[in-house]
């Protein structure tokens, strides 16, 4: 009996490590304007043809549960999406990090998006578009996979034809935040990833040639962070200036030629917690099961007769 009790303690007394992950990505593009070569803003009178559409979506998932919404229009504003318990109480259109350096605990996927304003002057109205997205995920239990993304401008296009030859300068202020965290208790396989991407392209619709591409590293490759069970702790990315002004100018675009501008704006995060027992734990489990088997085969001693 003592042997069986010891084996049961060895086998069932093991408890999984209390591990956790968190990832967050937030991108705020503000005062986005399209400027002429002289520095003035483009207005609708500068175009022979001007057709634009903005669409956005926000998607969050946890294991096999997914929630998603999308919107199309001049100023798409997708309601935040969340799955898990509990969902963060960020509030609608809150694009402030949960904390500057600390991870958020929980078991959820979260995404939100908002777009306002215009990049060109339309009938004299004030310009300066603002596009904001955030995505957050966390796991605090084993066998969990959380994924979240939100984007605006993946199909944000403007088909246009200019009145006269001119360049286009894309000018804006960017604020970026990316965090990935894996706790020291995490075992294989535990990962957390956060990625930001933004770009603007111009395609000549007559030749289908890409005539302009701008994807600043500050809000692309540099804004990618990750952590794993083999490299636990926190990875954090922010712009050194907090908010950085960025701009780039295209080559001269021809009048009476159709072009298309596409702006892509994405924040993506994922977290995986699928812990595999460590070799020592497996050995302990194996020895416990063997001991239990041996214990079952031991012959019973006859009870002494009185």
Image: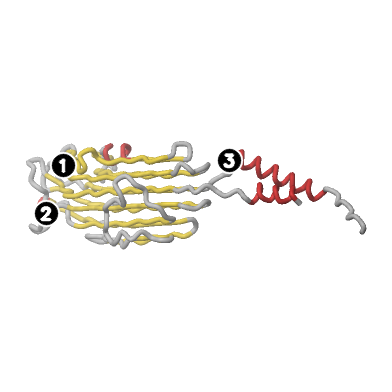
Density class for disc 3 (Cα within 10 Å; few <14, some 14-19, many ≥20) is few
Q: Is residue 267 visible?
A: yes
Disc number lying in front (1 or 3):
3
Pick whichever of labels 1 and 3 is earlier in the sequence: 1
Locate residue 178: give its quadrant.
Answer: top left
Q: Are marks 1 and 3 in contact (CB under 8 Å)?
A: no
- Residue 195, given in percent of the width and then of the height, sits at 35, 44
Which residue lies most toward the front here? Answer: 306
- Residue 215, given in percent of the width and then of the height, sits at 27, 40
Question: Circle 1 sits in a helix, a strand or a loop, which is it?
Answer: strand
Give the CA separation, mark 2 to mark 1: 14 Å
- Residue 140, given in percent of the width and then of the height, sits at 46, 52
Question: Circle 3 sits in a helix, a strand or a loop, which is it?
Answer: loop
Residue that numbered label 1 is attached to: 169
> Camera-side residue: 194 or 220?
194
Pick whichever of labels 3 and 2 is earlier in the sequence: 2
Question: Circle 2 sits in a helix, a strand or a loop, which is it?
Answer: loop
- Residue 111, given in percent of the width and then of the height, sits at 35, 56
Q: How many labels does the image show?
A: 3
| Vertical arrangement, residue 113 with respect to residue 40, above or below | below
Describe residue 173's horizontal placement relative to residue 306 as left or right. left
> Camera-side residue: 184 or 120?
184
Q: Are marks 2 and 1 in contact (CB under 8 Å)?
A: no
Describe residue 173's horizontal placement relative to residue 229 as left or right. left
Q: Residue 67 carries which label?
A: none
Residue that numbered label 2 is attached to: 121
> Camera-side residue: 270 or 103?
103
Residue that numbered label 3 is attached to: 278
């Amino acid at each position: 009996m003592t042997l069986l009790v010891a084996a049961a303690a060895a086998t069932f007394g093991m408890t999984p490590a209390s591990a956790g992950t968190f990832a967050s990505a937030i991108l705020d593009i503000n005062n986005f304007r399209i400027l002429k070569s002289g520095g003035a803003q483009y207005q609708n009178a500068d175009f022979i043809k001007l057709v634009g559409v903005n669409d956005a979506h926000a998607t969050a998932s946890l294991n096999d549960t997914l929630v998603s919404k999308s919107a199309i229009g001049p100023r798409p504003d997708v309601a935040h999406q969340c799955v898990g318990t509990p969902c963060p109480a960020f509030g609608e259109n809150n694009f402030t990090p949960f904390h500057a350096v600390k991870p958020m605990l929980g078991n959820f996927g979260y995404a939100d998006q908002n777009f306002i304003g215009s990049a060109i002057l339309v009938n004299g109205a004030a310009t300066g578009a603002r596009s904001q997205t955030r995505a957050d995920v966390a796991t605090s239990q084993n066998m969990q996979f959380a994924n979240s993304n939100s984007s605006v401008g993946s199909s944000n296009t403007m088909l246009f034809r200019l009145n006269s030859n001119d360049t286009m300068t894309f000018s804006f202020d960017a604020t970026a935040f990316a965090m990935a965290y894996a706790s020291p208790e995490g075992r294989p396989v535990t990962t957390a990833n956060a990625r930001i991407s933004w770009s603007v392209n111009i395609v000549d619709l007559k030749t289908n040639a890409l005539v302009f591409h701008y994807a600043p590293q500050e809000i692309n490759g540099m804004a990618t962070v990750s952590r794993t069970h083999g490299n636990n702790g926190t990875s954090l990315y922010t712009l050194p200036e907090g908010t950085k002004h960025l701009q780039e100018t295209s080559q001269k675009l021809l009048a009476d030629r159709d072009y298309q501008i596409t702006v892509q704006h994405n924040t993506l995060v994922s977290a995986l917690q699928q812990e595999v027992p460590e070799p020592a734990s497996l050995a302990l489990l194996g020895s416990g099961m063997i001991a239990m088997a041996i214990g079952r085969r031991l012959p019973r001693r006859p009870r002494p007769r009185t």
